[in-house]
Amino acid sequence: MTTKLNDLHDNPGARKDRVRVGRGIGSGLGKTAGRGQKGQTSRSGVAIKGFEGGQMPLHMRLPKRGFNNIFRKDYAVVNLGTLQAAIDSGKLTVGQKVDRAVLLETRILTHGRDGVRLLGKGVLTAALHIDVAGASAAAQAAVEAAGGTVTLPPPAPAPLSRDEQKAARAVARAAKAAKAAN
């Protein structure tokens, strides 16, 4: 049996009429409309989320776990197999310089505020010149074996040790005192 477009309808009971409260005592939800009498929750505009009548709320009773670092880096991850699939589909060409802007433009990536990390999952057979924020050793080896290059940013300088910090402050103080003496 074929169904016609003008015979389409929901299954019986799929759509239920909303309860119309405050429509007389015969409805079972008349007068106070199921809100009880007086008090905060009988009035409109009340949202007591998580309030349990003075009892310690569940979100405060449960133990807290973990830590969310708000300063963490947001890297987008791209695998070698993804790049090879993009070459096969024509989004990228062999020998092309690939960086974050190209990956966003070709919709291979959609995010990655702090750059792109290249990982070695999959196989890359075409030579690409890739400019990324980070890459695994396996990914770098695979790209170079295929005839391409991986360009990484220079490493950040190591932070000063406490002794070096003290020495730098002493030099700054001495320069300030010498300037004041002149």
Image (tube, grey):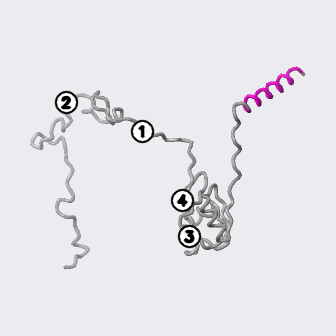
Q: Within 10 angstroms of label 3, few (less than 14), some, or many (20 or more) residues?
A: some
Q: Mark 2 or mark 1, which has the lower sequence index?
A: 2
Of callouts 4 and 1, which one flags the residue occurring earlier in the amino acid sequence?
1
Q: Residue 20's x, y, as percent?
A: 19, 46
Q: What range is drawn magenta here?
A: 164-181
Mark 2 element type: loop
CB under 8 Å between discs 1 and 3: no
On the picture, is 153 further left or further right than 174? left
Horizontally, residue 140 falls left or right of residue 9, namely right
* Vertical relation: 176 (above or below) 75: above
Helix, strand or loop at label 1? It is loop
Q: Quadrant of the N terminus?
A: bottom left
Residue drawn 68% across the image and 66% down it: 129
Of mark 3 and mark 2, the one earlier in the sequence is: 2
Query: Mark 3: which amino acid?
Result: Val
Q: Dot 2: few (<14), some (14–19), or many (≥20) neighbours within 10 Å?
A: few
Label 1 packing within 10 angstroms: few (<14), some (14-19), many (20+): few
Q: Tell me which numbered mark, 4 or 2, is placed earlier along the sequence.
A: 2
Give the CA distance from mark 1 to mark 3. 39 Å
Is 169 covered by the magenta stretch? yes
| Disc 4/disc 1 C-alpha distance (Å) | 30 Å
